[in-house]
Amino acid sequence: MKSGLGVRPELFAAIEQSKPDFGFLEAHSENYFGESISRIKLLGLREHYPISLHGVGLSLGRADDLDHAHLRQLKALADEVDPLFVSEHLAWSAYSHRHLPDLLPLPLTDVALSVMCEHVDRMQMALGRSVLVENPSNYLVFDQLQIPEPEFLNELAQRTGCGLLVDVNNIHVSATNIGRDAREYIKSLDSRFVSQYHLAGYTEVQRTVGDVTETLLIDTHNKAVYPPVWDLFEFVLAEHGARPTLFEWDSDFPELSVLEAECLKADQRLSHYDCIVAHGAPKPVSVSTLPDTLKEEQSIFLDSVLNVATDLKSAQTTHQHRIWVYQNNVFAALQDFLAEVFPGTRGVVGSDFFKQMVQRYVQHMPPEQGNIHLYGSTFSDIVSSFEGLQGLPYLRDVIVYEWALHSAYYSRVSNALDPTGIAQEVLLQMPIQVNDSVRLVRSEFPVFEIQRQSLPGYTGDISIDLSESQDNILVYKVNHKVVSRILSTEQADFIEQLEKSENLLQAIEALQGSISATSLSSALAMVFECRLLTVVEENQAVLH
């Protein structure tokens, strides 16, 4: 049995080139929602390796309903990938309209068990397959009667037919942080439900609270597996037998050879054990009415994270201050994400000021969905809340342009209109629309050059005259690549009119008299050349 590797877009090129001998690859599901080159490359790797999908955003433990749009995206991805496993976590990250990019702790009560059973059941029914649930890393314990976590997981699997993804690193991290016996935890798991293992590295952090300095292990997935975790892995194998095993490394990536070496260490240990007993089929779970207490607790927890509270009253007294772990995780994750989406903006204002912008934005407008790539559409609104940005009148347009680039990358482009062979009278009156990737950014400033010259690693001369030009930037996707193109005013006017029109004739007639026939012809040729139009679905028959 060969171990697998957590695959990330940063590793695609190296894996495609060398084709290492991995047993399988595992991808974070949400990174591949929507149409993108990353999704295409993942499907390409599917030709060489089994793929497992590991979710971090469905929020199975949330006190309200699951996000149905998220489930639909997950099902579409799973149907296309045909994964070895689909997994999620014993955790929550969303309640009501707020969704934080972290795995938040769930009080392990009877109510929480009912919530998890209902949501696992809905997930399995929606996907038409059994799923796995992973044990989380814990940093605090709630001040109420708890069901022991192994017993909770066993009961969850028994009621729903799901399997268990046993993260050995998380067992060690949690045992260290909250004083739990890792080996007793492992022995308490029911082998019938254990379906997969995870291995990873952690980061040791020391923090002083009052007169006490404590050491916490943070589940960072950016280091090699530590000896105590290897020891626990061998104990797990002795207790439960070999299972498909994954090594995770999610940031600060080393050479692929380093990751291969970690997988080889896992392979050597797996070779001494046999694989035993699989879990059963999904079982329907009856829906119950949920008390409001869990909803209130989750709302308070989200408030504590977003408002940077100094403690969490619902946690045990000695753990209340550890809310900082989740605050750090959430704000760091969103800062890193938004810095990737808005690199030019960060370059204009500087990293320290950008961090302030992100914190204010997150506090006032936290994410609403588990698909993090949908977050940031209103980031330009934050500009007006900072007095120090009044001297940067172009900044809002830079942000709008960078969001156009990001959103176009994940947009779906289908049914592109090819005018070849279509009679002119049919072409002009055919119901069309611009495709979903098209974005038109109009600015009084040279936004294209401002953004380009503000990117990390830019080494050319800085030469921007704010009065030099006014930009009309067309952003669109072709062959999975996002393209920016500077348009003339006439071309931009035509694109703008197309977005309002039902067919080409309507757009052309609306602009006659305000644009010369030559400019109109040039703009129309550009639209066809860039494949900006989509045939409305119900009118496909016109082409045949």
Image: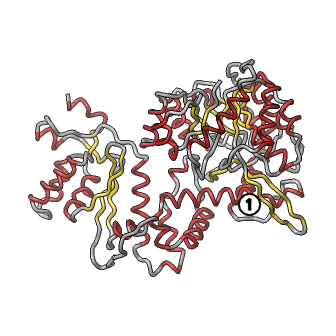
What percent of the width, then of the height, locates residue 105?
76, 47
What percent of the width, then of the height, locates residue 238?
81, 26
In the image, 217: left or right of 458? right
At label 1, the amino acid type is Ser
Q: Find disc 1 in the rendering and name its residue.
A: 304
The image quadrant where one finds the C terminus is top left
What percent of the width, then of the height, locates residue 148?
86, 37
In the image, 369: left or right of 392? right
Asked if one can make out residue 51 in the rendered structure from this viewpoint, the answer is yes
Q: How many marks?
A: 1
The image quadrant where one finds the N terminus is top right
Asked if one can make out residue 63 in the rendered structure from this viewpoint, the answer is no
What percent of the width, then of the height, locates residue 75?
53, 32
Q: Secondary structure at mark 1?
A: helix
Residue 123 position by quadrant: top right
Task: Name above or below for residue 185 compared with residue 435.
Answer: above
Frontmost residue, 514 versus 435: 435
Residue shown at 24% from the left, 40% from the top: 417
Residue shown at 77% from the left, 58% from the top: 205
What is the crowding at mark 1: few (fewer than 14 residues within 10 Å), some, or many (at least 20)? some
Residue 429 position by quadrant: top left
